[in-house]
Amino acid sequence: KKILSSNLLTTKNFSKQFSTDPKARNSSASKIIKKVSSYVEEDPSLSKTLAQAIDPQSLARLGNCLEQIDFKIIEPTRNALKIVALRSAVPFVAFGMMDNAIMIIAGE
């Protein structure tokens, strides 16, 4: 289990990672958000630690950004569903054939 390092949450570390160039800053912020996301996904209890470590203004801005994002669930295409069905069916068919063969041989 990864442990969220305290230096990830320090103001000094954030200011070092952010440059004055907006493009570089966005890239750096994106990397941090992805890293935090993976940590929270591995250990959901870290969300409480993060909530305590981030100042209220930043939390409010982050909350506003998340509310503005329109999350859409993309339905899988018919072709994608066929591929999943085929990939899932092959092992079951192979197992069934092997199981029947063993039962026939063992029953003789």
Image: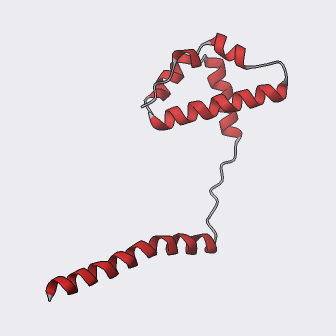
Q: Depth check: give the residue in front, 71 or 12.
A: 12
Q: Is residue 39 above or below residue 12?
A: below
Quadrant location, the N terminus: top left
- Residue 90, position as x, y percentages in the image: 45, 75
Looking at this rendering, what residue extends furthest in the top direction?
12
Looking at this rendering, what residue extends furthest in the left direction?
108
Q: Residue at x 24, y 80 (%)?
A: 102
Which quarter of the picture shows residue 73? Answer: bottom right
Left or right: 11 as drawn, with respect to 49:
right
Left or right: 52 as drawn, with respect to 97:
right
Q: Is residue 94 above or below residue 24?
A: below
- Residue 22, position as x, y percentages in the image: 83, 26
Left or right: 25 as drawn, with respect to 39:
right
Quadrant location, the C terminus: bottom left
Q: Residue at x 71, y 14 (%)?
A: 15
Q: How is the image coloured?
A: secondary structure
Q: Is residue 77 above or below residue 31?
A: below
Q: Residue at x 44, y 75 (%)?
A: 89
Q: Is residue 40 above or below residue 87?
A: above
Looking at this rendering, what residue extends furthest in the bottom direction?
108
- Residue 56, position as x, y percentages in the image: 61, 18
Q: How many marks?
A: 0
Q: Residue at x 53, y 23 (%)?
A: 51
